[in-house]
Amino acid sequence: MTNESARSIVLGDVEIIRVVEWQGPFGPARTIVPDAGAEVWKDNEEWLAPDHWAPESDSAVMALQTWVLRSGGRTVLVDTGVGDGRERPHSPQFHRRRDGLLGRLERAGVRPEDVDVVVNTHLHADHVGWNTRSSAGAGEWVPTFPNARYLLPAADDFHFGPENAYGGGLREEDRLIYEDSVAPVHRAGLVTLWDGSHRIDENLVLESAPGHTPGSAVLRLASGSDRAVFVGDLLHSPVQILDPARASCFCLDAAGAAASRRRILERAADARELVVPAHFGGAGAAEVRREGTGFAVAAWAAYGRG
C-alpha cells in the first residue's frame, strides 16, 4: 500500500491490511504491565525501543489500529478502534478524539458499504468505536458498516450490556461505550452473538480466550500453509511474550488472561502462527518461539512499520 498508515501482506489466500488510527507513547510502562519491573524493560531495551518502549519517558509505545482481511471474496474488519467524537471522560486518550479512521480505510481501498463482517474481539472502547458513526443532523449513532454482520462475543455483550446492569457497578464509561457503539448495531439487527467458537469462512475461525474480558476472543487464520492468530488484548506489550503471567492493567481477570495468553502463545509457537496483537507498535505482529518457561520474538512481520 502507498498510504503510510496502511501496509499489507498476504497469507495463503487472505490479504491482511493494517490500518493505523494512532501510534505513540501511551502510558507509563509499569502501569500498563504492572508485573514487568524496570529491569525487564531496561534489559530488553535494544529491541523494545523505540517501537514498544520510550526509555526517555518510560512509556509503553502502543498503536490503535484496525486489521482488514480480504478472505473468501469478503471484507472483514478486526476491531474498529476508538471512533471520533466519543464521550470518554474517564479515558483522556480516547475522549472526543478526531483521528479520521474512515479516511484511512478509504485510502486503503475499503469503503464502509463494502465491509461484510465486523469482528469485535471484545467490547472495550478502543475496539468498538467505529462500529457506529454520528448520523448527520439526526443526533444519533448509526452503524458505520450498514451491510456488515457484527460478530460480538456473547459473554461480553451480557457483561457490558443493560441486562447485567453494566456489570453491577462498572464505570459510567462502560455504559457510554455500550450505548453509542454497541446498542445501535443491535437495534439495526446487524449483530450475531457467539460463544465458544464461530467459523466465519474456510480461512477464519473465532475462538473464546477469556480473561481480559469475559468474552475476549482470538481470530485464527489458516490458509494453505500459512497461519496467524489475531489476539486482541491478550498482549499489550512484547514483555508479556517473555512471561505470559504478566497481565496488563486493563485485564478484568488477570489469572484467566494469563492462562489464555499462555495457551495461545504455546499453539502459536508450535504451529508457527503469526501473532497479531491489537496494540503493538512497530511491525505490529510477530512470530514467536519457546524460550525457557516463556517465549521470545522469533521474527517481526515482513511488512514493516505502519
Image (tube, helix red, strand yellow):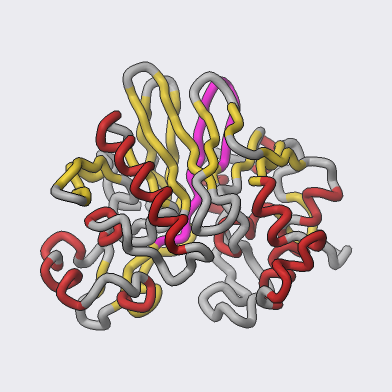
Where the N terminus falls, by quadrant?
top left
The image quadrant that residue 245 belongs to is bottom left
| Helix, strand or loop for the magenta stretch, by majority | strand
Q: Who's the residue at 44% across and 26% down the image?
A: 14
Q: Is residue 196 above or below residue 56?
A: above
Find out whether residue 129 is within the magenta segment: no
Residue 280, given in percent of the width and then of the height, sits at 35, 56
The image quadrant that residue 221 belongs to is top left
Instruction: Using the image as rendered, state which of residue 22 and residue 219 is in the foreground.
Output: 219
- Side of 142 relative to 287 (left or right): right
Residue 82, given in percent of the width and then of the height, sits at 58, 63
The image quadrant that residue 162 belongs to is bottom right
Q: Who's the residue at 29% across and 29% down the image?
A: 271
Q: Who's the residue at 78% across and 49% down the image?
A: 185
Residue 179, given in percent of the width and then of the height, sits at 77, 64
Furthest toward the top, the residue is: 224
Q: Which residues are magenta?
A: 63-77
Q: Who's the residue at 44% across and 56% down the image?
A: 257
Residue 113, given in percent of the width and then of the height, sits at 70, 38
Numbered marks: total: 0
- Side of 103 relative to 21 (left or right): right
Q: Is residue 170 above or below residue 13?
A: below
